[in-house]
Amino acid sequence: MKKLNILVSNDDGIDSPGIYALVHELRKVANVFVVAPDREQSAVGHSLTIYSPLRATKFHRDGEMFGYSVTGTPSDCVKLAISSLCEVRPDIVVSGINHGPNTSINILYSGTVSGATEGMLSGIPSMAVSLDSHDYNSDMTVAAKYASLLAMQIPDMNIPDGTFLNVNVPAVPEEEIKGIRVVHHNKSVWKDKYLKRNDPFGREYFWFSGEYIKSEDNAEADDTALHQNYVTVNPIHYDITNHEYKKQIKNIEELRLGNS
């Protein structure tokens, strides 16, 4: 069989342990092309760089060409790769492995998820992968194996247009993982809190220190299933229109300026 061509990006930066583990595993079964930010870009969402030039530099690891380091966001990286850097159009885009889970409301903020979103918007089957640990010393091996396993299934999954897969892996030994569960996103939220401090010059600044509040204990929701040691797969589909409410407010179409 012809090897798949997989574009890999992330938001933790091209030198993160997560992307290294992912690429190492995927290269066993596919042709892998890496384009990732030159520094950490966590929680940048789907932002794009439009007022500064993007620079793509060859990045070496272990004495070999690893990929391109880009002075931009994950969305920049995927766009630039597909339009200008990749010699062949990728069959799949995989973004990750992120350090820290991307479940519930975190999906909206995540640069990792946005990398997969950009692949989807380009018409390429895409997947975001995250590990349920923020510790940079966490073992990424199991998450990389599941990412590779799922990536190889994507060509046969008939993922609809406008949809991509968001995968979260428990940070536990392989033998403790119970399996894969297809889920929906939880309705957990961040209770915002900012620590007020002063710098060495006495100037005031604020540092985010929010609390994550889990909202439901549903075995079919991503947070719950992940904490039960399941690898969670959430098919994300962006349609931001509230179609039911749209029907309810149709009467405002009758409004005209100057009418009472």
Image (tube, grey):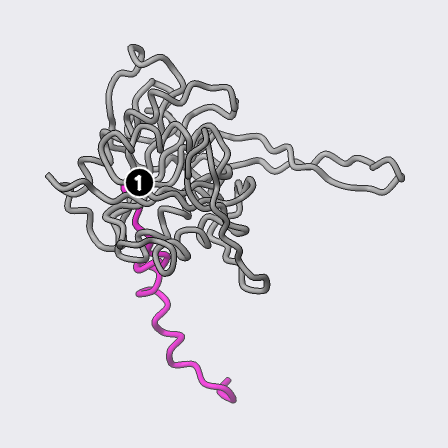
Q: Relative to 148, is 247 above or below?
A: below
Query: Residue 152 placed where, x, y %?
Result: 20, 35
Query: Residue 244 placed where, x, y %?
Result: 30, 58
Give the residue at the far left of this rendering: 1
Circle 1 residue: 32
Q: Secondary structure at mark 1?
A: strand
Residue stretch in magenta: 235-260
Question: Label 1 sits on what residue type?
Answer: Val
In the image, taking residue 122 as reference, residue 152 lies left or right, namely left
In the image, taking residue 238 as reference, residue 161 lies left or right, namely left
Q: Residues within 10 Å of mark 1 (few under 14, many from 20)?
A: many
In this view of the protein, which residue sits in the foreground, 65 or 254? Answer: 65
Residue 254 magenta-drawn?
yes
Query: Residue 109 placed where, x, y %?
Result: 49, 44
Identity of the residue drawn at 72% across and 34% down: 195
Identity of the residue drawn at 56% across and 41% down: 39
Identity of the residue drawn at 31% across and 45% down: 93
Question: How many numbered badges does the structure rendering display?
Answer: 1
Give the residue at the far bottom of this rendering: 258
In this view of the protein, which residue sits in the foreground, 66 or 22? Answer: 66
In this view of the protein, which residue sits in the foreground, 5 or 62? Answer: 62
Query: Residue 81 placed where, x, y %?
Result: 38, 53
In this view of the protein, which residue sits in the foreground, 256 or 161? Answer: 161
In the image, taking residue 145 as reference, residue 75 lies left or right, namely right
Identity of the residue drawn at 33% across and 45% down: 7
Q: Relative to 210, is 73 above or below?
A: below
